[in-house]
Image (cartoon, grey):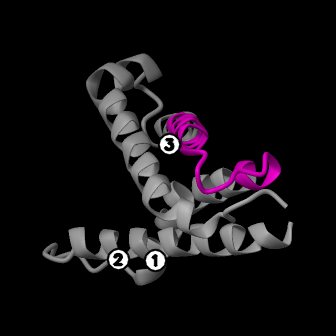
Amino acid sequence: MKPYLKTLILFPLILQGLATALFCFLDWDLDVSIPFNHYLFIAFILATIPAFLIALVATKYRYVRYNILSIVLCSSLIGFFYFYFIAYLLVVIKEPDISIWTWLIKDGLVLGLLNMCGMVFYSLFVLPFLLPKTKS
């Protein structure tokens, strides 16, 4: 567990900072003032929780740096299904008159695939540096 402590702490924390900065940057030119806490919460829900789940799976199955295929499979499955679970909750809460299938056909599938690709690329670029070189 000790060699994976760095993975469990730093992997979600780096993504929390990156996602919060990205949300602030993308909303920079809007006239509406949104508090910084809102960006932190959205980044936590959409990015940090799946990153922690990916780190937890990597720790449980004792991934090493060179398990690239396992990292891709794990991060793509977690990113894809977690996003659709959260999206389903948001669709039910915000727009109760629209069905989940209508939302999926309209723009949900593209958003889910983009989220999955983002999680895979982040995992491929950051996770191998945080994982140990050998199983101990």
Q: Is residue 95 left or right of residue 67?
A: left
* Residue at figure coordinates x 48%, y 65% from the top left: 43
Residue 48 horizontal/vertical position (percent): 57, 63
Q: Chief secondary structure of the magenta span?
A: helix
State which region is magenta: 57-80
Q: Quadrant of the C terminus?
A: bottom right
Q: Which residue of the protein is positioned furthest toward the front in this rendering?
A: 134
Please indicate whether residue 128 sits to the left or right of residue 54 in the image.
Answer: left
Q: Secondary structure at mark 2?
A: helix
Q: Tag 1, which secondary structure?
A: helix
Give the residue number, with chain letter if any, for mark 2. Answer: 21
Residue at 55 percent of width and 60 percent of height = 128
User: CA separation, marks 3 and 2?
Assistant: 23 Å
The mark nearer the N terminus, 1 or 3, is 1
The number of numbered badges drawn on the structure is 3
Residue 81 quadrant: top right
Question: In x, y percent, where is residue 33?
Answer: 27, 80
**Residue holding disc 3:** 90
Q: What type is the residue that disc 3 sits on?
A: Leu
Foreground residue among 66 and 16: 66
- Label 3 vs label 2, nearer the camera: 2
Residue at the spot of label 1: 17
**Mark 1–mark 2 contact, CB under 8 Å?**
yes
State the image quarter where residue 109 is shown: top left
User: The N terminus appears in which quarter of the rendering?
Assistant: bottom right
Q: Amino acid at mark 1?
A: Gly
Q: Decide: is 11 above or below 51.
A: below
Residue drawn at the location 50% of the way across and 35% of the way down:
80
Q: Amino acid at mark 2?
A: Ala
Res 32 quadrant in image: bottom left
